[in-house]
Amino acid sequence: VFAATDADGAATALNRLLREHTGPLRLTSHDGGSPWHPHVDHDDDAPWGAWLLASSCLALTVLVWDRQRPPGRICASPSCPDVFINQGSGPDRRYCSRRCATRERVAAHRRQQS
């Protein structure tokens, strides 16, 4: 999803993840233990990791639907495997954090100086 360059690519990746890792959308209150809320994991007794994956798929789906573009990117730093969500309406970020951006700028400056 984060490697996608356009909404079509993000949707294709998300559809595969939704097909493989989510169950049908349903409302649950966990037998009255909480307010009604949506779940997309396979059942209320699914492991926490399965819930997190399914819920993340749903959240990313809403972002692609709302923005009609990939929800984020993989950090542009070759030494960083992190992904991030693009927030706001400004230009897309290239790096996951200021730290990665600064590290890359310093490395580029040092290459130019040598």
Image: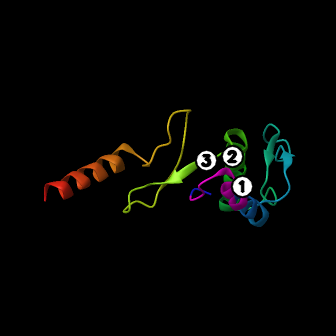
Q: Earlier in the sequence, mark 2 or mark 3?
A: 2
Q: According to the image, label 1 marks what residue? A: 11
In which quadrant will I find the N terminus?
bottom right
In which quadrant will I find the C terminus?
bottom left
Position of residue 66 measured from the top left corner of the image (x, y, whole percent): 71, 39
Amino acid type, residue under disc 1 in the picture: Ala
At a point 50% along the width and 42% down the height, the residue shown is 92
The verdict on residue 5 being magenta is yes
Residue 99 vs residue 22, the one in the foreground? 99
Position of residue 9 measured from the top left corner of the image (x, y, whole percent): 67, 58
Q: Is residue 68 above or below residue 88?
A: below
Q: Which residues are magenta?
A: 3-13
At a point 69% along the width and 43% down the height, the residue shown is 68
Helix, strand or loop for disc 1:
helix
Q: CA distance from mark 2 to mark 1?
A: 7 Å
At a point 66% along the width and 52% down the height, the residue shown is 56
Q: CA distance from mark 1 to mark 3?
A: 10 Å
Neighbourhood count class around disc 2 (C-alpha, 10 Å): few under 14, some 14–19, many 20 upward? many
Q: CA distance from mark 2 to mark 3?
A: 6 Å
Helix, strand or loop for disc 2:
helix
Using the image, tell me which numbered label, if any, was put on residue 64: 2
User: Could you tell me if the residues under marks 2 and 3 are in contact, i.e. CB atoms within 8 Å?
Assistant: yes
User: Could you tell me if the residues under marks 2 and 1 are in contact, i.e. CB atoms within 8 Å?
Assistant: yes
Using the image, tell me which numbered label, if any, was put on residue 104: none
Q: In terms of image quadrants, where is residue 4? A: bottom right
Q: In terms of image quadrants, where is residue 81? A: bottom left
Q: Earlier in the sequence, mark 1 or mark 3?
A: 1
Q: According to the image, label 3 marks what residue? A: 71
Position of residue 13 measured from the top left corner of the image (x, y, whole percent): 68, 61
Q: Which residue in the rendered view is the most extreme toward the left? A: 114
